[in-house]
Image (cartoon, helix red, strand yellow):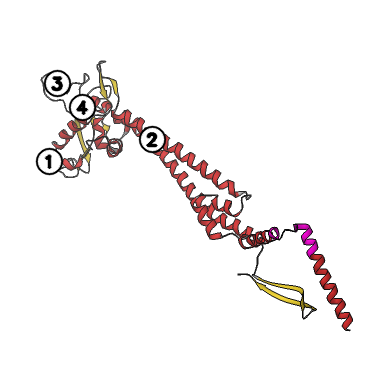
Amino acid sequence: MRKILLCVLLVSFLGSLVAQAKEDWIWGDDDQAEEEALDKDFITINYAKKNAHLAMVMSALVPGAGQFYADKSAFTTYIFPAIEIGLIAGLFVYQKQGNDKTKDFERYANQELITYELGDGSSIETYRYARDRQHRIEEILKGLNPVDIYEESYFRLDAHDCQHFYEDIGKYPHYVFGWADWYYTFATDASGNIVDENGDPITPIWYPGGHSEEPFDPNWKWRGNYPLWGDNIGVPVENDTHASSRMRETYVNMRNEAKDAYAKTNYFKFGLVFNHIGAAIDAVRVTRKVNRGAISDSGIRMQYYTAVRDQNLTPTLGFNWKF
């Protein structure tokens, strides 16, 4: 029995030597190279798994960064950055388009001189919109009825060419009086004169409306007037319709085109937000997929080897814990 046990131990010892020789043949005889290889394996095991939280944060900030960190070969690693570039490009295109159209309607309103033809065939050079024309009509309105809505606070047109000014002259009908086609149709004669042959001021022919036509009614509101010259001088024109000023109608359409361009930029902004959110969620998916195929190491290893104790070959079972 003892001889059989010694034979088993001898075979185990020879097997260990053969295995060592085979390993030396594969990796070489250099002990330092062997240690480097083992160290390399150790690092690979410990860093094979990726941090899903880190990947999510990276892609939330820069879409595709988390996927690149987890798996450079993943399809979405390059999809999300491509979408990001496209959305940013679209945002800049429509932002520029909105800016250009804004400059266009501002120039149309009061930044370029035009030649306007009067009713008698003569022409004048003027801007399409002028504050002095608006203020002249305001003064007339404020003097018609001392208790109606047309008092000082009702007219607050900005004195500067700011965003509120360009909004007000197209949005509110009580600022229509500054447009050239309204003024030279309703507030002057066919020659564009603001005084008649006797030197008396020519004023629009107002007609009342609103809730009541009774004098001194605080709800009294002027709604339109009759043209002072032309084919239909007996037909009143409502002030809050585009029939009173085609220039204003064109201006409003130009502003709407600018607003439409700016509205499209909002779609791209929302797209960018969703792209960042989607990239962050996908980064977690990619990381988990990578981690499922990663090597896990509990740190505890069992080793079986043959040792010499008291000049006898002794089979030994040992445990190794790396931490």
The first of marks 4 and 1 along the sequence is 1
Report the quarter where the C terminus lies: bottom right
Front label number (4 vs 2) = 2
Label at residue 99: 2
Within-10-Å neighbours for mark 3: few <14, some 14–19, many 20+ = few
The first of marks 1 and 3 along the sequence is 1
The secondary structure type at the circle numbered 4 is loop
Q: Which residue is mark 3?
A: 196
Label at residue 187: 4
The secondary structure type at the circle numbered 2 is helix
Looking at the picture, which amino acid does disc 1 mark? Pro
Report the quarter where the N terminus lies: bottom right
Looking at the picture, which amino acid does disc 3 mark? Asp
Quadrant in the picture for residue 171? top left
Q: Position of residue 185 (x, y in %)?
A: 25, 25
Distance (Cα) linking label 1 and label 2: 43 Å
Tell whether 31 sits left or right of 242.
Answer: right
Image point (54%, 45%), residue name:
81
Distance (Cα) linking label 2 and label 3: 44 Å
Residue range of the region highlighted in magenta in the rendering? 20-34
Residue 151, visible in the rendered structure: no
Q: Position of residue 277 (x, y in %)?
A: 51, 53
The secondary structure type at the circle numbered 3 is loop
